[in-house]
Amino acid sequence: MNRLTNLLLILFLGTNVFASSEHAHSLLEPSALLESAGYTLALAQSTELRAVDVLKNANNLRNTVNELRAKEYKAEDDTEKELLHAQVNLLAEQLQLWQNEGAQLRQLANEMKHSASELLPIGFQALWPDQLKFVGAMQLAGNDHAPMAHNTTIRSVHPTMLGKMTDGTVTETADDMTLAMPSMTGQSAPEQLNVSTFQVSRELHYFAHIEPANSDSHTIPLNTIHQWHLFLTDQNGMPVSNAQIEFSGHMPGHVHGLPTLPRVTQEMSPGLYLVDGVKFQMKGWWVIEFITKQGDINDSILFNLNL
Amino acid sequence: MKFIRWVLLALISGFTTVAANPNQFSQQDIALLKTFTLSALGALPEAPDNRWADDDAAASLGKALFYDPALSRNGTISCANCHQPEKYFTDGLPQSVALGTTKRNSPSIPNAIYGPWQFWDGRADSLWSQALKPLEDDNEHGISRIAVAQLIAEKYATEFAEIFGDEQRLADIRTLAIDASKTPVVSPEQSAAVNKVFSHVGKAIMAYERKLTLTDSKFDRFVQALETNAGNALAQDTFNETEIAGLRLFMGKGNCASCHNGPLFTNFEFHNIGAPEPDITDVDLGRYAGVETLRSSEFNCLSVYSDAVPEQCDEMNFLKTQGPELVGAFKTPSLRNVSQTAPYMQSGQLATLTDVVAHYNSPVPPYYDREQHPSRPHFDIIPLKLTEEEQAQLVSFLETLVSPLPQNNPWWFP
């Protein structure tokens, strides 16, 4: 955890947990870490919105400054030119301040998001100390670090798609191998893919964690139906029961989906769901989405898998 | 600047020295290659839907049924017509010929016993339900299930009574009209008895097929030799240079291992690779149609003739039923013994392995006809850009996947 997280924890938990006399003897409620992450993310979101607002105003101001500059350039009267010049200078100073402010707010928002994401694994562990087993990224069993992507980026091949028709397979060789294998770059995966199994939902209503069920390691089998555990809390770190959850998965690089239709088959204990029927028929970049429905709240949680 | 150029040159030459020695394999290479060897195959998959899957008596009975031409309309066609042991249980024809000509190429049985799906379109979810379809197909055995049940009552009554406890059922079946020219009047009890006995025919044949195991191929022995010799391919004489080059292409530029992975060189899933459409006036919808047949099959894992409880039917319970990926898609065939099982593709459209590799090298998108296809088929094969020499190397590698015919395996031959 970085300093920002600690600071936020102290500020937030100081007023929340220790104020409650009946829990004064315990350091933290199990949900407190995720609650803190939720608060940080809400702060990050409002900070991000402020950043957007400030930068939008800065853009408008820049347009004004540019217009005035053009006027100043064209002005024939010296007094007018001088007046315009003074205006441009003063406004340009403001512009600089606004831009700095926007950039700083945006950076702060990113730091808050980052620090909140660091809270998620320990937050979930605090809530489910006995059930939660793995915090690392999911990997395929066996040759777990060898790239073997199904190397393509397009839905349909047509002779008019020149680049795709002439390059052949892009391969790469892992450090400890001599076999060159189709590389992940062919699938247009982002450089720094977020493959954490701890994620916050799109609308910030939920936190979720996934891991293989009935497994002694964080690896999952290829070409075999298997099960996952899905841990789900709300933004206050409270386990979410009776959520309606849909599961979908696809390979962005190939525009095709999973070979099965997995689904949540039972809620094993409050907030802990069993996902059954999961199967991967290919290595590569997979995106898994849980679409959640709870009363009027619609939200979704995305996980990236680099198998 | 000059210094940097020297450093770069040193780095590049260092890299190429490593990459240019095709005869040295690392421990990680071997670990990966081992996932493709028969040693990674493990035990036969569980078959909760067939209680007799590993019953030796059922297997012996299944072998007799497999080779018995009496199980056909005119008494001349057995399973072995299109699944010939000396051809790795294929028939060498583009499309199989029995009483008529079928739509599809005969698949190799030993490769099929580990997969969740049978037929090119996966319209059966077990070997036992697969075995029943050709019996009733007019182009294949062309015999009704009632006639099959009557034949069993006549010819295999002792075995069916002993193994499956079918004594009463066979007695019920014997009361059916024997006159084949008349449609017999069948009571619901008799119908259930017929279906049950019919399903047992499939289950016995499946028990037999599970005995058709593969022996190590040249490729399997090559990986073993690499392991013994610390990855040094020069210390072995199993693979020559061309085959080693072909193996490296298979895993790399050839992009083959994306789908042809695991010890049987298949992911058992369905893909449209744009093989030429055999008949553009009547397109083959592949998995898209197969999945519908599978769902309505009276002999699938969820059926009353299955020995499984529904919770054990994972593939059926999480079956993918929609999506452009299913349109014109066919099951990834195993590459074990592939050089012995020509011709290739679902209808034998490609005659040789050279043709197959050439197809992948310059693929053409699948035929699409909006009148016939429910949607444009999904297609994601890109040209490999392999040279003629590389294509030949790839074919050489594929030829190393042959398991010698097991002359001493009594299950394999009649």
Image (spheres, grey):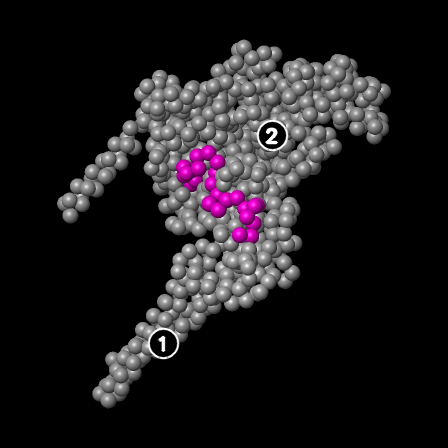
> Percent x, y for residue B372?
59, 42
Looking at the image, the residue that sits furthest to the top is B408
Kind of element beneath mark 2: loop
How many numbered marks have been drawn onto this rendered protein structure?
2
Query: In which quadrant will I find the C terminus of chain B?
Result: top right
Q: Is residue B352 visible?
A: no
Chain identifier of the residue bearing label 2 in the image: B
Cα distance in 3D space between marks 2 and 1? 68 Å
Kind of element beneath mark 1: helix
Left or right: B184 as drawn, with respect to B296 = right
- Disc 1 packing (10 Å; few <14; some 14–19; many ≥20): some
> Percent x, y for residue A283?
46, 39
Query: B343 or A20, which lies in front?
Result: A20
Membership of A145 in magenta stretch: yes
**Residue position for label 1:** A61
**Residue position for label 2:** B118
Left or right: B193 as drawn, with respect to B396 = right
Q: Please give the name of the residue rendered at 62% of the width and 28% of the height, measured from the top-left corner.
A: B46
Q: Are marks 2 and 1 on the same chain?
A: no
Q: Which residues are magenta?
A: A126-151
Chain identifier of the residue bearing label 1 in the image: A
- Disc 2 packing (10 Å; few <14; some 14–19; many ≥20): many
Q: Please give the name of the residue rendered at 24% of the width and 38% of the height, measured from the top-left corner.
A: B12
Left or right: A108 as drawn, with respect to B338 = left
Q: Amino acid at mark 1?
A: Leu
Q: Is residue B308 visible?
A: yes
Q: Amino acid at mark 2?
A: Gln
